[in-house]
Amino acid sequence: MSAPRAYRFLLALAAAATVSSSHAAAIASQPFDIGVDMVQVFNDRLGAGRFFAGAGTDRLRVSARVTPSPDTDFYDQSSNGGETAIFVTHPSTPGLDTRLQFVGLQSGGGGGKNDYTTTFNLANPFVQGQLAAWDATPFALRIENPSAPGGETTKWVTAPDYDSSVNLPFLQDVAITGGGLAPTLSWTVPDTTAPITNIRIQLRRIDAEEPGRITAATLVHEAVLPLGSNGYTLDQAFSNGGLPGLPSGLEQGSKYEVAVILESAEPGLIKGRARTFFEFTPLTDDAGDRTIYLPSVDSAGNFNFDIEVRAGETILIDPVVAVGYDYQIGSGDPLFASVTLPNVGDGIFELWLYDLNLADFVFETFLDAGERFDFTGGGVDRFRVLGIEPSAGLDPTDVQAFVTEIGFTGNGRFTGRMTPITTNFTPVPEPSSLALLALAVLALGGLRRSCRAGGSLR
């Protein structure tokens, strides 16, 4: 090819590229018509947790997958996704015109592509007064986009039927067994009248946190489990491990939040969902096959248990670092029968018992690390431990930092909580709900006191 012809050929290629770029720009600026891919209305139960908004509440959730959205602007070259607005209404509730929030991929809100959602707190008296009507007649969604090119700038959609009776349970006896980076998570699913049609697990790495709140977390793994599953071993490559900067498995020194999700669904429609959240830090390889029962952590920082206990057996509970802790059973739980404290700091602690007449804790005795103290008089419903030196330097977010062994007077469930006492401690008549960052229960699985483990499981 001669030089002039080659030059003209290059000019033609450049012109074609310019036309192609102009065409792409034209496509990128093209508005989309309103499209509705999915609408869901269901009961969404959120267990206690430190990451998701609304954790610890039962909610009615209305969700929709609609285009255009900010996601189609980013991925599919629409130009009007940011103008989409979705509102939920109901004929029996005049004035109800609640806007759905965009929670899609470009929002950072944790939803899927083109997802919008809103919720109603089922504990709200106004909502409770509307449930019968909402159950009897479907919601309607009004979807608006003033730049939709087909002339239909407003679309009405009738939502699926809402069934207020579908309420799934939270998990019980949540535990982690085994040291190293391939432990097994286990749980018990309580009896339920609603059918469970799907079980999922999500694992988030905790990237930043404050007392009572996880401020940043990254979804590193999720999986669908077989129906009837009561456990999951973290021995496979993480589902998001191929993404830049994300790990292929657990990492020592990292902390994680787990969500186990139970769903009751019909084809294409969720009718009810329950999410149980718990946190853990991988144990070291030398921890063996000990079982640590994991609490749910609420937004106030309280660690809440739901564990089966038996008379004559002990469990190890591990709160965060502080100068002391208040221990209290839940309503109807067996009483505390004994306590044994670990070797932390100077290994000398103060035991305080609650005096009903004074409505306060009073000093009982000093306890040495490893010394078992048996409560007399049939057990106690609460006690206080003081004397932990701040200089002990325990990691306040490590769930294996301070292991405390307790026994119970009878069989039943331990649904109590533990509350830390900080260095600015002022006595209070009842255990307060101070910030609590890490807690776990190490069950001895039926072993008697002669098999008591001593010290930390770090």
Image (spheres, helix red, strand yellow):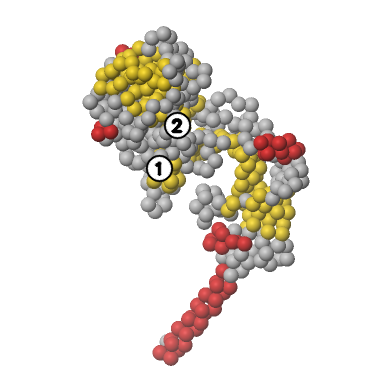
Q: Which residue lies furthest to the front in this view?
A: 358
Name which quarter of the figure residue 213 lies in: top left
Whether residue 307 is visible to the viewer of this picture, yes or no, is no
Residue with the mark numbered 1:
210
Whether residue 208 is visible to the viewer of this picture, yes or no, is yes
Q: Looking at the image, which residue is at 41% across and 35% down?
A: 435
Q: Residue 8 carries which label?
A: none
Name which quarter of the figure residue 43 lies in: top right
Q: Is residue 202 left or right of residue 162?
A: left
Foreground residue, 113 or 102?
Answer: 102
Give coordinates of residue 374: x percent, y percent.
Answer: 35, 12
Q: Looking at the image, which residue is at 28% across and 18% down?
A: 367
Q: Looking at the image, which residue is at 39% across and 36% down?
A: 437
Residue type at mark 2: give it.
Ser
Q: Which residue lies furthest to the left in this view?
A: 346
Q: Quadrant of the N terminus?
A: bottom left
Label 2 crowd (10 A; few <14 / some 14-19 / many >=20): some
Give coordinates of residue 112: x percent, y percent.
Answer: 55, 50
Residue with the mark numbered 2:
433
Q: Is residue 147 left or right of residue 186?
A: right
Label 1 crowd (10 A; few <14 / some 14-19 / many >=20): some
Q: In this view, does 87 lie above or below 189?
A: below
